[in-house]
Amino acid sequence: VGDPKQLPATVLSQSAAAQGLEQSLFERLQRAGQPATMLQTQYRMHPQISLFPSVHFYDAWLKDGVAAEQRTSGFHRHPKMRPMAFFDVEGVERVNSASKSLQNSAEAELAAVLYHELRKQCKLSREVVSVA
């Protein structure tokens, strides 16, 4: 089971990468001619968020299993805390020497401020709000 349109696994081992382990089992089976059946309905994202990948990666084929009205949360009623928001943050991206991933301290600081404001203004506990 898998979705070849999603981001691939991160493989840090050169040896594993040389053996083709950067590809998921799902992708390898597909390339070997095994027929694939893609699920059409997603339940994880708010419809306002799933619209972008549906249109740009799945040719508008991906459907929502939960309506926007059913996907509301206490913090969605706050005008600054909609299902998605974009912020233009000036900062410098650096490569972490250990993980090789990009990091931006200015973006991380903004995320922390938003997290604390959300918890304070909406009176939410740590168990209700998480940052991934």
Image: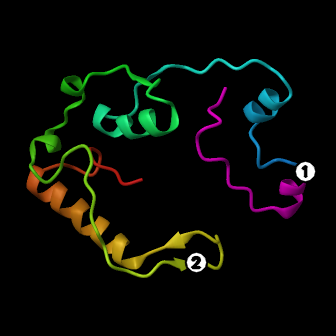
Please give the range of residues in magenta: 1-19
Marks 2/1: CA distance? 26 Å
Q: Amino acid at mark 1?
A: Gln
- Quadrant position of residue 72: top left
Q: Amino acid at mark 2?
A: Val
Q: Determine whether, in the image, residue 126 is placed left or right of residue 54.
A: left
Q: Determine whether, in the image, residue 108 is placed left or right of residue 97.
A: left
Decide whether residue 5 is among the magenta residues: yes
Q: Identify which residue is drawn at 33% across, 40% down.
A: 49
**Disc sitting over residue 19 in the figure:** 1
**Residue position marked by numbered label 2 in the rendering:** 95
Give x and y (percent) for residue 25: 77, 34
Give x and y (percent) for residue 28: 81, 34
Give x and y (percent) for residue 120: 13, 58
Secondary structure under badge 2? strand
Decide whether residue 73 is among the magenta residues: no
Q: Identify which residue is drawn at 76% across, 43% down.
A: 23
Q: Identify which residue is drawn at 83% across, 23% down.
A: 33
Magenta residues: mostly which secondary structure?
A: loop
